[in-house]
Structures are given as C-alpha cells and as structure tokens.
Image (cartoon, grey):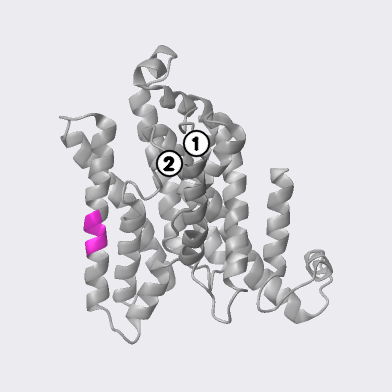
Amino acid sequence: MLALGLAGALATGAMLGPYPLSPVDVADTLIGHPPDPQAAIVLWNIRLPRVVAAALIGAALAAAGAAYQTVFRNPLVAPDILGVSQGAGFGAVLGILLGLPVLAIQLMGFAFGIGTIALVMAIALALRGMGQVLVVVLCGMAVAALAGAGISLVKLMADPDDQLPAITFWLMGSLAGIKQADVAAALPAIVAGLLPLIALRWRIGLLALGDDEARTLGVEAGRLRLLVILSATLVTAAAVSVAGVIGWVGLMVPHMARLITGPRFDRLLPVALAMGAALMVLVDAAARCIAQQEVPLGILTAVLGGPVFLWLLARGGRTWAE
C-alpha cells in the first residue's frame, strides 16, 4: 500500500504545476510520444527533476529523523538536533553573500554541514564529564546557536535589494530551479548515507534498548552510534545543500510511520523512507499550485507538521518506544 501511495504521489507531482499535464500526456511523454514539444520540455527538464529531488530529500530527512530518534532514545530529536541544518544553511548563505554560482553555494552548504558535525563530535569527545549522548546533544544545540548567529550576521551584511531576498527565500526551503545536475550531485551523498542505515537497521534498533543491553546482544554501541550519526548527518547535509532548510519532516514522519510499524527500527526505516518521499513530493506539488507565486516548502511543512504533531501528542497514552 505504501509503494502504491508513493507511486501515486510521484504521478501527481509529475502532473501538477503551472503547466498541468494529464496522465495520458505524462505516459505518452515517458514512452517517447509527447503530445507536443512543450510537454516534453516541461516533464523532462522541469517536472521530473523536481519530483525526484523531492522524493530523495523527503526520504533522506525522514530516515535521518528516525535514526536520530532511535540512537538518542528521544522522540523530539530531529535532523537539526546536532546543528547540521543550521551549519549547512550558514555555508549556503555565506556563498550567496560572496556571489558564488549555484553549484558552489550547494557545495559550501554541504561542506559546512559536514564540518558542523565534525566540530560537534570533536567537542563532545573533549568533554567526557557527562553522559556521552547528552554531551553530543548539548554540543549540537550550542553549535546550532552559533550557526544561527552567523546566519543572522550574514543577513545583516547582505545587499537588501538583491542578496537578502535570495537568502531569506533559500532559508525557507525551495526546489524552484532544480535541475538534473543538482539531483545528480546530491544523489551519491544521500545514497552513501542511507546504505549503512538500511544495511544495519536491525543492529541500530538495538540501541533503543540501551548500551548495556546492546552490548549483551553483541553490538558495539559506541561505534555503531557514531556511524549512525555520521550517516544521518551526511544525508541531512546533502538535502539542505540542495533544497534549503526544510523543517518538521524529520520529526513528523517517523512518528507517523511508528503508528504503523511500532518502534522496531528495522520495520520503521523502510516505512519512513516511503512516507517521507511521498509527503515531500505532494508538498512540493502543492507549493507550486496553491498560489500564483511559489510557496516555500518550509512554510507548508510547518503548517502540516504543527497540527499533526499536536495530534500525535494528544493521542498520547503510550510512550514513543512502546
């Protein structure tokens, strides 16, 4: 059912937009018989790259959120808990301030995102006086605050007529202007980060039991936790470098998937991947259809995520791991 739902979301995303395409138009264009040249240009050069990018980013953020929540045994953890989103955002807005081309801006966002997690882990290793997980979370919050201050400083220094609008719009998240080259650039990093999570999903699920129980079952908790954090950070940084800062997906989707699968990570991960991909494709389709000017993705995910999360809290009665 989830596979069918994802296929339906992808088809819907391919059809909707300022230049709508019927199911017949999409099918004919895909098999090489477009109804008109404009339909082929819209589908191959504009619509499909956006749909594929939205699916990748949604799946990446949902998987990262599920992994973080399991590793830190905290249902309120999201991909930006370690400051990755803020760090990648700071790198990207700095590139915009310097007037760099789009590819260089994406590379700076990705590099700063990875650099953020490296800084967080380095500080956490130097501070061994508290529980390791708590130290990592607190260091992430501190580094995220520093990155947020850097973003504010860059916005203050930016040209208010040119650079500041671009920075503000990028920070709200968008797939406008996404191209096949952008998808190709982000794909290797997202796949490289998702593969360890998928391959080790059973072992990762044992981390929710606690380090002592995981070691009893033959899992080296410290090394596995570090690998999971690095993998989730990699996919988050890649997603942010392409689409900007998109909140709530990594927090909301794992909770929704957990209603179907329960807390077992080996079952939760594939469901979260499918639900995250479908949700982001539909949100992106709505972003380009509900108004004359495209609505930033971050606004729509916040509008969806807030009520859904409140409903999940009101549903209550059971803890996230029950």
Q: Is residue 147 magenta?
A: yes
Q: Residue at x 39, y 62 (%)?
A: 107
Q: Which residues are magenta?
A: 145-149
Q: Left or right: where does residue 311 sit relative to residue 213? A: right
The answer to whether 290 is drawn above or below residue 202 in the figure is: below
Q: Mark 2 vs mark 1: which is more N-terminal?
A: 1
Q: Mark 1: which amino acid?
A: Leu
Q: Left or right: where does residue 167 sit relative to residue 249? A: left
Determine the secondary structure under disc 2.
helix
Could you tell me residue 77's position as x and y percent?
Answer: 38, 43
Q: Residue at x 21, y 70 (%)?
A: 153
**Res 75 visible:** yes
Give the tally of numbered discs.
2
Q: Pick the residue in front: 223 or 73.
A: 73
Residue most toward the top? 216
Could you tell me residue 299's position as x and y percent?
Answer: 47, 66
Q: Mark 2: which amino acid?
A: Ser
The residue pinned by badge 1 equals 197
Q: Do the numbered discs 2 and 1 sit on residues whose CB atoms are within 8 Å?
A: yes
Q: Mark 1 Cα within 10 Å, few/some/many (few <14, many 20+)?
A: many
Could you tell me residue 315's position as x and y percent?
Answer: 52, 40
| Quadrant in which the N terminus appears | top right
Q: Residue at x 24, y 55 (%)?
A: 145
The residue pinned by badge 2 equals 231
Could you tell me residue 190's position as x and y percent?
Answer: 50, 49
Asked which quadrant contains residue 90, the reply is bottom left
Asked which quadrant contains residue 282, the reply is bottom right
Name the magenta segment's main secondary structure: helix
